[in-house]
Amino acid sequence: MRNKEISEKFYLIAQLLSLTDENPFKIRAYEKAAQVIESLPQAIEDIAEDFNKLSSIPGVGKSIAEKIVEYLTTGKIQRLEELKLKFSEGVFEMLKIPGLGPKRVRILYEKMGIKDINTLKEYARRNALRNLPGFGEKVEKNILEGIELLSSSQQRILLFDAIKNVEKILYEMKKNKEIIYIDPCGSLRRKKETVADIDILCCVTKGKERYVIDKFTKLSMVKKVLACGETKGSILTDDNLQVDLRVVSKEVYGAALQYFTGSKQHNIHLREIANKKGFTISEYGIFKIGQKEKPIGGKAEKEIYEILGLQYIEPELREDRGEIEYAQRNELPKLLELKDIKGDTHIHSKYSDGANSIDEIVEYAEQLGYEWIIVCDHSQSLKVAGGVEIRDLYKKIDEIKSLNKKNKIKILCGQEVDILSDGKLDYPNEILKELDFVIAAIHTGFKQSEEQITERILKAMDNKYVHSISHPTGRLLNKRSAYKINISKIIEQAGKNAVMLEINAFPERLDLDDVNSKYAKEHNVVLSIGTDAHHISQMDYMFLGVYVARRGWLEKDNVVNTMSYKDLVKFLKQRR
């Protein structure tokens, strides 16, 4: 899929247009197109085979569609090439500096002739920028820090790691009795799969704002203090993660929480609706246009949506992917919750490369309040992961039957069966039919072509003993890209064959992702959420799978994990 590649081109066009006198609406159109293309579950090159279908995508239109076809045909977009000629390569790098933005880059370029980061750094060190309009000493300092952060920046961190970081911070900050409310915002609150930095919002006892900021900048995990003002503090943690804390008054906490949660596109769309209704929205509340002295709402977040005539939109949905239109019609889905989960579909035991016995897994599942679990070990060909030979598989089946006679929690005997390079499965059908649950997976042959890998999975889904496909794209976040696969074709075929697809909740996988999970729902595919736990503690990863499901608009009925044991067994037998 070339979706990300093409979306990045349109994001760059929007940024470069921001350095010119171009109409803001045109800039917004390119940004919107980039976002839409990035979020498409289908491969853009497949859609582009039908120009009418391509141009009818909301946010694309004829002009953008022509540029997509141009890029797919020639490898270039003429409009982008023309814009590139107007600016040096160094300007593109300047646009990457955190917090600088196109407006300031334009001032630097036009007023000072600064065309690269090294020159910018030199000017900032000589205090030669502070007299520029909209700059000042503080901005000058921020530029230097931004350049430093850019040069030493790490990859976006996993959602799981971001959550763990923020939990430590909130635990320490909540010891201060001056804090009334405190919440993470931004992409972390929206539960995006990776996070660049962390935004935290809080309100405190009046007059204690600076005191709380000081406490924040003195936390044990602070590596460097980036800013320490009256109402905002910014730190760099030991993990090189930037964390910003903002303090707002109790009266506008809800408005600020909504604003700083984002996403940017969601908030832009909300403001457009507000303006049409005679309102304006900011982090300070919602106001009637022309009456900014006193907000008519904003103490609670829900007020913003209520005043605009919208159903409350959960943070995970706020990506401008149609949630606002659904909220206008009061048709938003009732999203899956962790409390709805009755079992885990993918746990490894000592039979392959897991650390725990099935007995130990059952005991931990009881602590989690589960009704059932499915123990899925690796199949025989995956020697590196202790793949289970057929003779040992029968032992596993017998052990589970024995345990089910005495345990309250029911165990299903499953296997994560390798899809071999030719699309055949790692066990013969006479073995597969003995299993309660078969989840097929690709663990080898990642370098095969898109056609080969796609065909392997399609062939596996034709086998009536296969219930689900594990981690369907094979990616490892920040480590390994997805293998080449036509995932939309896989999803569509899964819907036709009544085969489930997995949301693998392991922190580095989260695969299927949110976009493809939503597409699966639209094609009547039931999703299974498995932690892929290799140690009982990793069974706690279930919440990450639920977050992906929520971002994918999934409800209880879309996920097999919400079924009772009786209904689950009946459902699995239907496949055969």
Image (cartoon, grey):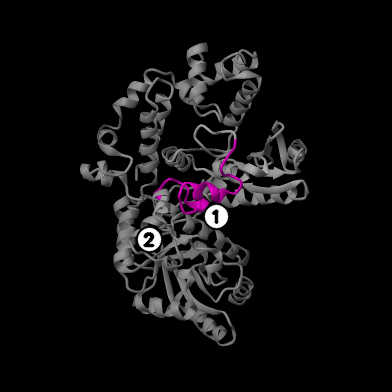
Magenta segment includes 297 = yes
- Amino acid at circle 1: Pro
Q: Secondary structure at mark 2?
A: helix
Establish if 211 lies above or below 367. above
Establish if 457 lies above or below 93. below
Stretch in magenta: 294-322
- Picture quadrant of residue 380: bottom left
- Picture quadrant of residue 80: top left
Residue 354 in sight:
yes
Name the quarter where the C terminus is drawn.
bottom left
**Horizontal and vertical percent for residue 8?**
40, 35
- Picture quadrant of residue 247: top right
**Horizontal and vertical percent for residue 132?**
57, 14
Query: Which residue in the structure is indicated by mark 1?
Result: 507
Please name which of the two marks, 1 or 2, marks the residue nearer to the observer.
2
Residue 171 is left or right of residue 11, and the answer is right
Main structural element of the magenta stretch: helix, strand or loop? loop
Magenta segment includes 173 = no
Query: Which residue in the structure is indicated by mark 2?
Result: 521
Q: Secondary structure at mark 1?
A: loop
